Image: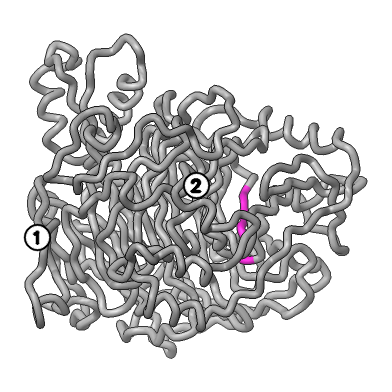
Amino acid sequence: MAAEGGGKEMNEIKTQFTTREGLYKLLPHSEYSRPNRVPFNSQGSNPVRVSFVNLNDQSGNGDRLCFNVGRELYFYIYKGVRKAADLSKPIDKRIYKGTQPTCHDFNHLTATAESVSLLVGFSAGQVQLIDPIKKETSKLFNEENSCQHLWKVNWNEERGIEGSKTSEEALVTVQRLIDKSRVTCVKWVPGSESLFLVAHSSGNMYLYNVEHTCGTTAPHYQLLKQGESFAVHTCKSKSTRNPLLKWTVGEGALNEFAFSPDGKFLACVSQDGFLRVFNFDSVELHGTMKSYFGGLLCVCWSPDGKYIVTGGEDDLVTVWSFVDCRVIARGHGHKSWVSVVAFDHYTTSVEESDPMEFSGSDEDFQDLLHFGRDRANSTQSRLSKRNSTDSRPVSVTYRFGSVGQDTQLCLWDLTEDILFPHQPLSRARTHTNVMNATSPPAGSNGNSVTTPGNSVPPPLPRSNSLPHSAVSNTGSKSSVMDGAIASGVSKFATLSLHDRKERHHEKDHKRNHSMGHISSKSSDKLNLVTKTKTDPAKTLGTPLCPRMEDVPLLEPLICKKIAHERLTVLIFLEDCIVTACQEGFICTWGRPGKVGLLSPPSQASPPGATVV
């Protein structure tokens, strides 16, 4: 573990760090924020989120950046490590009244230089479809049709935004017909131009089609499928309407979900502390995992779909095997809740033991030493080759990162000695804890399931969201709809939700629930966690939730304080790493060898979240 010094040095914000690849540097001129560059008062506001899309612009400036700060939403040209950010000319800016943006996602399949589809979720439960290039608002979901009135006031230079128009929009406060709770996550379904999935703090998820309306009355549902701690309903209607499907998953808020690289599986993390992995098309539960304590807040897939990493209120990152349905490692480096986890597709390395297996000899070997899109594609190809039974032995190291409310960035390496516990564990990367390799899968349904990454996915977009699969899944999605229509009518069974006391829970966490206080009596603290149908005290020590000493404990390669306020964004791009904090500053960290000479910005750089 890369240790910092004591005292003042521990509280000093870092502007660079070194890994085995070289030196990563913060680029102050590439910092994005609100045009006035004033830190945002984050108390009571929703987390800052960032979305990327590439428009394949022939000029070479095809990257677009969207981020929310409070009740504002911004859309910029992202110049990355090449040029300094120009905050005076956002492509689009929107200010909302009565609600705040909470999350957003671009449709990479339909994006062009003239048009882009952006979904935005809100704290009051609505989902808006907008085109920030055309400055249009096309549809509003989870609102009564007769009340979908948006009014806009165009602001111009007098508001300090030169060369652009700013829309102030008021979402009329009416009864939400589908779900009244805050939108926690919204994503386009991989491979689809019209389907998208929305999660709410109620614990429900809804599948929408942008071509369909939501109706003027509350939807009626019929049961499609039910299992342990989940139920899926279809909308009962004479004509097709939104939502197409309603998922009720676990208890408490559904904090985040992520599609597998091939789009066939869906990983969900909830406030009840459970990771649940579903086959998205057949709506079957594949496997589950329980956090050490507290809720799970974030989730991501490895590039080949073999592993899932989660983070949450136990201050840990947890690595779960998709194939074996069990925890294979935990990582301890954060001092507070982990808010984002993400794999670095460009640094994950694959090496074959026989050099004759390289397709291009010298060129292929050099490919292992450089970053870039070619490297990421080559890595995915080798990961798929590694899954083949007739290939030669392959050594793989997965790189992933995490950021948390402790304002720290951690980078982790997941190596062969962790992935295959029958081999001796390396003391350099882990403690002496050895996992029982013979433990049965947790939450497995006993079915043989192909790893979702065996088929090589298409090239990765410059986005933290997983690549949209090029496979034709129109038939598979319609099969779900056909099955839903053919299924019998049943009463909708709502899972009970526990009224959590957030402030009290946070105080308990700060006093008792940090990793520094975990001891042999930690099971006593489990009673403070939100109660679920599965007793946490009974799951601890089982394959569902192994004890700390039963699995390897990873130590971070680096652990650096990089912001004043809690971190909410971590995205790995080809030539940089992007982070963001709750103050509204989006920072760019140049990768080794990728930092060029930036032209100076047109205005003075602010102190922001950087300390030199």
> Is 216 in front, or is 482?
482
Q: Is residue 386 left or right of residue 156?
A: left
The residue located at (21%, 70%) in the rendering is 562
> Is 594 in front, or is 402?
402
Q: x, y percentage for residue 199? A: 61, 58
Sort mark 2 into few (<14), some (14-19) or many (20+) by Cα contacts within 10 Å.
many
Inspect the image, locate mark 2, and give the three-letter code of the amino acid beneath it.
Met
Is the magenta region chiefly helix, strand or loop? strand
Inspect the image, locate mark 1, and give the three-letter code of the amino acid beneath it.
Leu
The N terminus is located in which quarter? bottom left
Q: What is the secondary structure assignment of the residue under circle 2?
A: strand
Q: Is residue 344 left or right of residue 294?
A: left
> Is 273 in front, or is 582?
273
* Residue 342 covered by magenta stretch: no
**Quadrant in the rendering for residue 283:** top right
- The relative height of residue 201 versus residue 499 in the rendered view (above or below) is above
Query: Which badge, 2 or 1, is on the more N-terminal residue?
Result: 2
Which label sits on residue 597?
A: 1
Residue 454 appears in the picture as rendered: yes
Q: x, y percentage for residue 245? A: 74, 47
Q: x, y percentage for residue 433? A: 25, 45
Q: What is the secondary structure assignment of the residue under circle 1?
A: loop
Q: Which residue is mark 2?
A: 289
Report the label total: 2
Magenta residue span: 196-201
* Residue 199 covered by magenta stretch: yes
Which label sits on residue 226?
A: none
The residue located at (20%, 45%) in the rendering is 432
Sort mark 1 into few (<14), some (14-19) or many (20+) by Cα contacts within 10 Å.
few
Q: Is residue 374 left or right of residue 165?
A: left
Q: x, y percentage for residue 265? A: 54, 37
